[in-house]
Image (cartoon, rainbow, N blue to C red):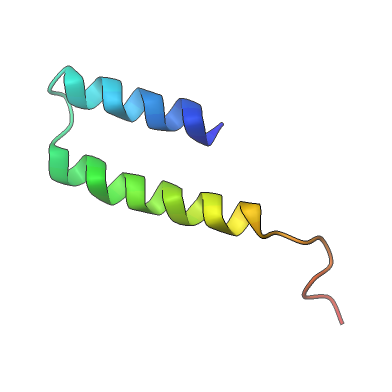
Amino acid sequence: MLEARRAALVAARDERKLDDEVLREIMEEIDLQQAVLANWEPGRFNS
């Protein structure tokens, strides 16, 4: 899902609908989301 979002953002940038700086900021957010999901362990924070 994140890969599809990433591809759509790059396409919007290529079509000049999205500024490079905005693209970089959103990509950083996606990278953080991917890092969290990659390290997710169900029940990790349950007491």
Given residues 24 and 47, the one toward you in this image is: 24
Quarter of the image that includes the N terminus = top right
**Residue at the image position 39 percent from the left and 53 percent from the top:** 29
**Residue at the image position 12 percent from the left and 22 percent from the top:** 16
Q: Is residue 20 left or right of residue 28?
A: left
In this picture, is 39 found above or below 4?
A: below
Query: Which x, y percent locates residue 13?
Result: 20, 27
In this picture, is 47 found above or below 3?
A: below
Quarter of the image that includes the C terminus = bottom right
Q: In this view, does 42 lie to the left or right of 34?
A: right
Query: Which x, y percent locates residue 14?
Result: 18, 20
In this picture, is 3 found above or below 24?
A: above
Q: Which residue lies furthest to the bottom in this view?
A: 47
In this picture, is 47 found above or below 7?
A: below
> Which picture quadrant has residue 40?
bottom right
**Residue at the image position 81 percent from the left and 60 percent from the top:** 42
**Residue at the image position 38 percent from the left and 25 percent from the top:** 7
